[in-house]
Image (cartoon, rainbow, N blue to C red):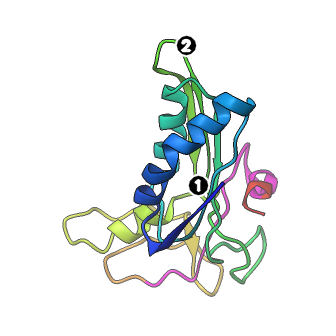
């Protein structure tokens, strides 16, 4: 099933579709829910957790605008493309949850840095045009993010693609 968020936030669209998605999964053994034309979804685990609390293993993916340079790259070519999954514990709770951006730091954390009361994030999350790691301050301009480093280096960047 698919839901049109009408260029609003993903959460109300998800809330509207959740009963139908649960019903379809119970009836068919599986279900797929796509939310389109939406604004940021924030924490993707928010959605998968709700489904797991109803007894379903839930996997969530989303795309985003290009802001990540692949290892060795000097141009934004891929998005932060978060991935999440939640596994029920059989008692209405969560046995396991995974929720991760595919970059070293999530875009939401960068955006929050614009607030003056927030401390700066450390260098190594993004680079400047000379490909040098940058320390983020309130007066920032991110040229591109670095991909997540699973076991170091470029190995984790495949998740972003």
Which residue extends farthest left?
Answer: 117
Closer to the N terminus: mark 1 or mark 2? 2
> Residue 144 at x, y = what percent?
60, 77
Range of residues picked out in magenta: 141-157
Which residue is drawn at the image coordinates 64% and 86% (left, top)? 130
The local crowd at label 2, few if under 14, some if 14 to 19, many if 20 or more residues have their Cα within 10 Å, is: few
Image vertical order of residue 95 relative to residue 48, above or below: above
Is residue 113 in view from this perspective? yes
Q: Within the magenta stretch, is there residue 41?
A: no
Q: Within the magenta stretch, is there residue 145?
A: yes
Which residue is drawn at the image coordinates 66% and 72% (left, top)? 68
Is residue 45 in view from this perspective? no
- For mark 2, give the secondary structure: loop
Which residue is drawn at the image coordinates 66% and 34% (left, top)? 25
Where does label 2 land, which residue?
A: 90
The quarter of the displayed image where residue 34 is located: bottom right
> Residue 112 at x, y = what percent?
33, 66
Residue 101's disc is 1
Q: Nearer the viewer, residue 146 or 24?
A: 24
């Amino acid at each position: 099933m698919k839901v049109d968020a009408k260029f609003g936030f993903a959460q109300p669209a998800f809330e509207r579709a959740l009963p139908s998605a649960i019903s379809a999964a119970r009836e068919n053994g599986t279900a797929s829910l796509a939310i389109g034309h939406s604004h940021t979804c924030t924490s993707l685990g928010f959605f998968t957790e709700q489904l797991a609390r109803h007894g379903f293993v839930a996997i969530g993916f989303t795309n985003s605008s290009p802001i990540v340079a692949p290892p060795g790259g000097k141009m934004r070519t891929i998005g932060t493309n978060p991935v999440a999954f939640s596994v029920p514990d059989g008692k209405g709770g969560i046995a396991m949850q995974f929720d991760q951006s595919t970059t070293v730091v999530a875009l939401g954390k960068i955006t929050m840095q614009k607030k003056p009361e927030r401390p700066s994030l450390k260098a190594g999350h993004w680079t400047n045009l000379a490909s040098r790691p940058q320390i983020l301050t309130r007066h920032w301009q991110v040229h591109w993010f670095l991909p997540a480093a699973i076991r170091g280096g470029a190995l984790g960047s495949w998740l972003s693609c």
